[in-house]
Amino acid sequence: MSIHQHNPSKKPDSEFIKGNISFLKEGNVCRLLDGRRTPGFIEKINYESGMFRWRITDFEDKDNYWDLPFEKVTSYQFEKTCIPLSESDTELINEIILKYNQPLNILCDEEDFMKTNDKINHLKTDITHWLKSKSKFIASGESLDFNSNIGPSMLSDDLVRYMKEQGLDQLELKTADTIVLNPNSGEWIKGMSIVLAELGLVSYHGKIQRTKDIFSGIGSKDLRESYILHRLAFIRGLFDLLEITHVPLYRGMCSEVEWRESKNTFVSFTFDSNVANSFSGFEGDNNFRNAYLIKSTVDISKLFMSYLETKQMNERYKEAEALLFNNLKIII
């Protein structure tokens, strides 16, 4: 049984049209080609960045929105009553897609990795002292309960307090909010991915930036780097204190299309095998062409974010999520 909200009476695919750029018109109603066919509509078209805003109208993320590249419209299906764009407007959309369809690859450098690791280890020493003296979770004497799908609130409060002391709380808020909603919405996570690659932690394979302000304000490269280093040092310091070096994690995945290589910076796992199984699509009738369910015992150094210390991962969804760097060598 699905762990997420869904509509058992949803309309069949035959009543919809496969998405294409001619349907990128404000007001057009469409639904995502996920397993539950999440409904929404095209709310806004941004010609400057080549992105459209899709407003969600049901389920856990109702009333939230995603900002996606024009070409991602093929991941949706539209109501047959939708009005397409004119030929000239469709051509304009296509020209913008070609403008931004430029690859950007930043490969990890071993020297950068060593320097970054040294910085994390240095910070980890300070954070360990902070945890021993200021952490309410550590002071409580509680242990991490991996059988619970809700992380300890004292620990997530600890992280927020620590980040606030460092002046990085707004970056934590924006990063966690975006990851829980959709890491591919907007360019905030793209900016983090680029900085992670420059730090030598995980290579970036994606497209060029679309928005002018990706590295301005709280998104500056200096602040992003500081945030990444402090967050990783916090997690590693915490698990060191708890004498945990590895954690068993699970991942389930299913797809209605052929296999394709993931070039994302992050990959999502879960501490709960039942959650992973629900994502595998093994149960019941479905249209999935491919599916898998795997287990991996992961070194803590691969962990960027988890439900254990992240408040947002314990709100709408109870998936016991663990977000890892996508540099694991998994053969399937």
Image (spheres, rainbow, N blue to C red):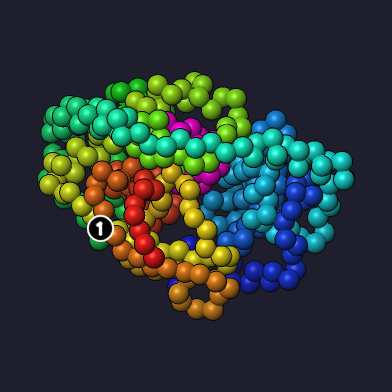
Left or right position of 265 against 148: right
Q: Secondary structure at mark 1?
A: strand
Tally of marks: 1
Left or right position of 27 against 110: right
**Residue at point 71%, 47% (across, down):** 42
Is residue 312 something that shows in the picture?
yes
Please state the horizontal and vertical placement of residue 270, each as a whole percent of the image.
34, 57
Q: Which residue is mark 1?
A: 297
> What segment is highlighted magenta in the picture?
180-195
Locate residue 238: give its quadrant: top left
Please state the horizontal and vertical placement of residue 116, each as a whole percent of the image.
29, 30
Q: Amino acid at mark 1?
A: Thr
Is residue 160 something that shows in the picture?
no
Does the segment drawn in magenta span residue 188? Answer: yes
**Residue at point 25%, 35% (across, down):** 234
Q: What secondary structure is the stretch in magenta mostly built from?
A: helix
Name the residue furthest bottom.
285
Mark 1 Cα-neighbour bin, 10 Å: few <14, some 14–19, many ≥20: few
Does the segment drawn in magenta span residue 63? Answer: no
- Of residues 324 and 32, which is closer to you in this image? 324
Q: In the rendered image, which quarter contains the C terminus?
A: bottom left
Locate residue 133: give its quadrant: top left
